[in-house]
Image (spheres, rainbow, N blue to C red):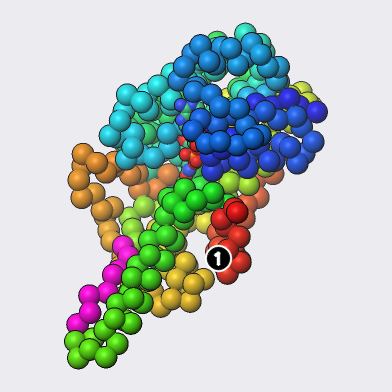
Amino acid sequence: MLKVYVTGASGLLGRQVYNQFKQNGHSVLGTSFSRQNKDLVKIDLTDNEQVVKFFDGHEFDVLVHCAAERRPDVVLKDPKSAEKLNEKAPGMLAKLCSKKNIFMVYVSTDYVFDGKNPPYHIDASANPINEYGVSKLNGENAVISSGLANYLIIRIPILYGEIAFFGESSVDTLLKNILSANNHNKDLLIKHQNSSESNQINFKKVEGDLFQVRFPTLTTDVARVICEACTKRVLHNQLNINGIAHFSAKDPMTKYDMCKLFCEALDIPSDGFIIPVKPYPQANKESVANRPENCELSVETLESWGIDTSYQNFDNWWLSAIPKNSFISN
Ligand SMILES: NC(=O)c1ccc[n+]([C@@H]2O[C@H](COP(=O)([O-])OP(=O)(O)OC[C@H]3O[C@@H](n4cnc5c(N)ncnc54)[C@H](OP(=O)(O)O)[C@@H]3O)[C@@H](O)[C@H]2O)c1
């Protein structure tokens, strides 16, 4: 049995990582920041004193560091806060892990690449084109230069999965926009039912980006890969599990494709309602961060380690989850 500490255990990915280790019989300790949860301890990872005290008071063999500011536009607007959480905190955690010989997993992102030359292997040069990508890359480098010998930096693409609230991930934000526009249009139809101007109603439309090619990956698949890597590395002493690896689903999709799929699952006609936009709608460079075009990640390193890189099909997952409303936790 492993003793595992999961940071960001209240977040989209951290919840699944926490559950995955629990379900596999490991002892898990999780921390949150602002969210109350009886199973989690609250901590501010940007406060070194709190972090040191936490490490002094708990014993574990593995740290999975999921906490981060993952929204590129938020990082663009508040780079100082992002620097503390995305760069300084992982460096501090890695130093503490080094002292106690703890295996650290740092969750990183495909946004460390510029998206111009996919697919990306682990030795490809990083060249982030937005501040979020820079902060996560600096976090990687803080782990690497901390003196910690045993770590895994796992880069992953855009995530989807069970959400705690609408808008938690950028994928379900699309679904939220579609539902809200559709409800608005239904109200307009009722209001103008008997009006002679009903053919001039300004129905809401939803923009779907056609520029960025994404590889949306299910949070439970990422959690499974992390759990398997830690088990093989720490319990089974598979020493080659060290350094950088990439995990990703392999089905390319644009946000336009995702919007069309959501309409299909909701039985809403998408023609004339979902509007393709290209290039990425960057209305305001001060508030909307740049996005790389295609950061496809090669998973060959995980495969060479004998780790299961299978993944759930995006369409199947949503076509099953939307009618049952099972994508949102109660
Ligand atoms: N989501 C994606 O599409 C995506 C894609 C690629 C990589 N990633 C990476 O995957 C990891 C997990 O992302 P996610 O989507 O699960 O993020 P998330 O849902 O936004 O969760 C972020 C977590 O960080 C915690 N946190 C925030 N500020 C903190 C602080 N000062 N001290 C301690 N904890 C703090 C939050 O706690 P509270 O909520 O309790 O405040 C929450 O648990 C991140 O490293 C991210 O960069 C995500």
Image quadrant occupied by the N terminus: top right
Percent coordinates x, y for residue 205 in the rendering: 30, 69
Magenta stretch bounds: 200-207
Q: Residue at 42% of width from left, 60% of height from top?
A: 176
**Against 158, is 84 above or below?**
above
Taking depth in this image into account, of 293 and 321 the one nearest to the observer is 321
Percent coordinates x, y for residue 97 in the rendering: 61, 15
Percent coordinates x, y for residue 194 in the rendering: 27, 91
Rate crowding at label 1 as few (under 14), some (14 to 19) or many (20 or more) other CA atoms within 10 Å. Answer: some
Can see residue 143?
Answer: yes
Taking depth in this image into account, of 194 and 320 the one nearest to the observer is 194
> Was residue 84 drawn as part of the magenta stretch in this picture?
no
Taking depth in this image into account, of 126 and 235 the one nearest to the observer is 235
Write down the residue under mark 1: 322
Taking depth in this image into account, of 196 and 130 the one nearest to the observer is 196
Q: Secondary structure at mark 1?
A: helix
**Against 251, is 187 above or below?**
below
- For residue 159, side relative to residue 22 (left or right): left
- For residue 74, side relative to residue 214 (left or right): left
Q: Amino acid at mark 1?
A: Ile
Q: Residue furthest top?
A: 99
Q: Residue at 62% of width from left, 14% of height from top?
A: 55
- For residue 258, side relative to residue 235 (left or right): left
